[in-house]
Structure formats: structure tokens, C-alpha cells
Image: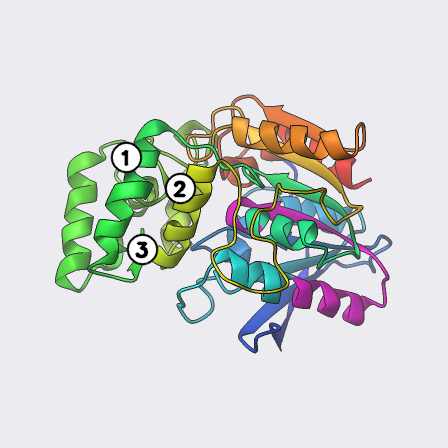
Amino acid sequence: MTSQVESRDTVISFPALDGREINLIHVEGPRAATKGPVMLVHGAGVRADIFRPPSQTTLVDLLVGEGHDVWLLNWRASIDLPPNEWTLDQAAAFDHPAAVRRVLAETGAETMQAIVHCQGSTSFVMSAVAGLVPEVTTIVSNAVSLHPKIRPFSELKIHWVAPLIARFTPYLNPGWGDTAEAPFEKAIARLVRLTHHECDNDVCKGVSFTYGTGFPCLWSHENLSDETHEWLRKEFAECPLSFFAQMSECVRRGHLVSMSHLSRLPRDYTAGPPRTDARFAFFAGEDNLCFLPESQERSYDFFDTHRPGQHALHVVPGYGHLDMFMGKNADGDVFPQIMEELG
């Protein structure tokens, strides 16, 4: 295990294109960056620090150490920001274009690259396909992008259980395993404890209940250090049912669709050629129980049809969803492939 890279953070707050406050974390190493900017975009109900688990070399460490100019985006799904009933449409139309512009303004660069995960990936790819982030030349997408494919029991949960829960609360929060206060929150926490027995971390179990099917769902326990498994208790919070409603429709259609009538966004993201020249590198953990590897395989096929030979697909054995970034051995098993795609 190599050591973590010394770095310092600068937080830059700015408005998304609809005025909602979001922020970027600029991560600087002991030496000035020698390569262009790369922005990392987290998934739903977490925050930018999900890319920086403790006691191991992280992807951020590796990027900084290799001279990349590293930026972590807290978009409107971040738990570091006030809870809100966001949709993928809002992130695609308002957050990601504003973040790209801000990084380029801060750095003076004309182009940049992005590493995007889960719903940070779906929403960012929506921006790209709609032609809203033409300055991004390489997009490394993990877990899911244009074609969400989930397990049958997860389909039952997202189509039927999530709308039922939405009658009682606007949010689901895996953190209720440790922090439940209201009666409904306590009821969900008890339900999770009754149905999940894979470990003694109630937040870990709540994550699996919230985001799919599995014991656990987003990682393999064998891939996480004990310290990371404990650390993740603080890394999950509110995720709005408004998101689950949109993803439910996307799963039904077999591809991403917009749920709003924003003129900047297409209704169907697969109806025509992507309006981007970016090169895509699609990553999937072979053992992903949240979004099946077929999700990324389908998206790779779609992009390859329109620009044959330009894109790449990596299905990584022994990994699932978030352990692609949080795994204790990911610096040797996963990160070198990502770094190669960035060039």
C-alpha cells in the first residue's frame, strides 16, 4: 500500500445556472499541477469526499501525484448541501455546465476531463449528450450512464416500494440506521435491521436497502478496510424520492429520459447521435449489484455505433459499485486503468 499524497483543499462556492448554490473543492499537491484539469463527480446521497476514503491511497491522491489539476464537485445531490428534491434533469441542465465553466475560468484551460460515478455519471452524460459541456474531452464513467439495468427485485423496489415510501417522506436516508428520530425514520431503520444481517454497521445495511439488492449492495465487505467500513457511516444521508421516480421511468424505458420540459434537454437521450466529441471510457464492476454491468455494456455499444473505435469498456472482476473507488486494493486493481484512459 502506497502512502497518501500531501494536499490542501480550497472550496469554491458558486451558483448553478438556476441559482442553486453548489461548490468545487480544488485539491492541490505540494507541487504545481503539470497536467490539465480533471473533475470528479459523486453519486446520489453522498458527497465529493466519497472519493477519499481513509487510510489508503485514493484516486485523488494518485491524480494529484501524477500532476493532474484535481477538482471535486459537490452538485445538488451532495449531502454537504441543503437537502432538496433534485432530478437528473436539473443536474444535467444547471449544475454540470456551470461547474465545467467554473473550472475552466479558474484554471484558464480550454478543455478538461471528468471522472463521473453513478448518478453523477447519468446526469453528466445527459449534459454531454445534450451538447452542454463541449469543453470536456474525456469522460470516465463508472457503474451506469445512458442505459440503467438493475436486478429484478430492485425493479420491484423502485417501481412499487419507492412510490409507497414517497407517500410518507420526501427522502430516504441510509444514515437513519444511526440517526433516526421521527417515527417513520425509526420504522425504516427497524425494517432494515430485520431484513439485513450481513454486518453490524446499520448504515452499511441501510445503503443496501436504499440503493438496490444485495448483502451488501454497493461493495464487497472483503474489498473494504475496517476503517473505511466504519468511515462510511458518515458518508450517506438524504436522497430524494424525486430521483427514484425519474430512475424508475428510465429503467422502464431501458435508457435515460428527461422528466421535465427543459428546452436544453432532449426527452430521449438515445434518439439521435450524442452531441459531443468526448471520448468515453465506461467502467463497471463485474459484481455490481446496484447497476448490472450490462448497463455500461449497452452504453458502450450505443456510443461505439455512432463513433466506432473511439471509446473503451472495462469490466473489472472482483469489484462492485463504490468499491471501485473505496476498495483497499483499488489503487492497484482499478485506478491504473482509469489513469491510462485519462492519458
The residue wearing badge 3 is: 173
**Number of other residues with Cα within 10 Å of mark 3, as a class: few under 14, some 14 to 19, many 20 or more:** many
Residue positioned 57% across, 31% down in the render: 284
Colouring of the image? rainbow
Question: In the image, is 106 to the left or to the right of 298?
Answer: right
Residue type at mark 3: give it.
Asn
Nearest the eye: 66 or 248: 248
Sequence order check, earlier mark of 1 and 2 = 1
The residue wearing badge 1 is: 199
Sequence order check, earlier mark of 3 and 2 = 3
Residue positioned 47% across, 56% down in the render: 259
Question: In the image, is 91 to the left or to the right of 245?
Answer: right
Closer to the eye: label 3 or 2: 3
The residue wearing badge 2 is: 229
Query: Where is residue 119 drawn, in percent x and y?
Result: 51, 49
Residue furthest to the top: 317
Query: Where is residue 200 drawn, in percent x and y?
Result: 25, 39
Nearest the eye: 238 or 299: 299
Residue type at mark 2: give it.
His
Indicate the secondary structure of the residue bearing disc 3. loop
| Quadrant in the picture for residue 25 | bottom right
What is the spatial separation of the Cα atoms under label 3 and label 1, in whole angstroms?
18 Å
| Quadrant in the picture for residue 314 | top right
Sequence order check, earlier mark of 3 and 1 = 3
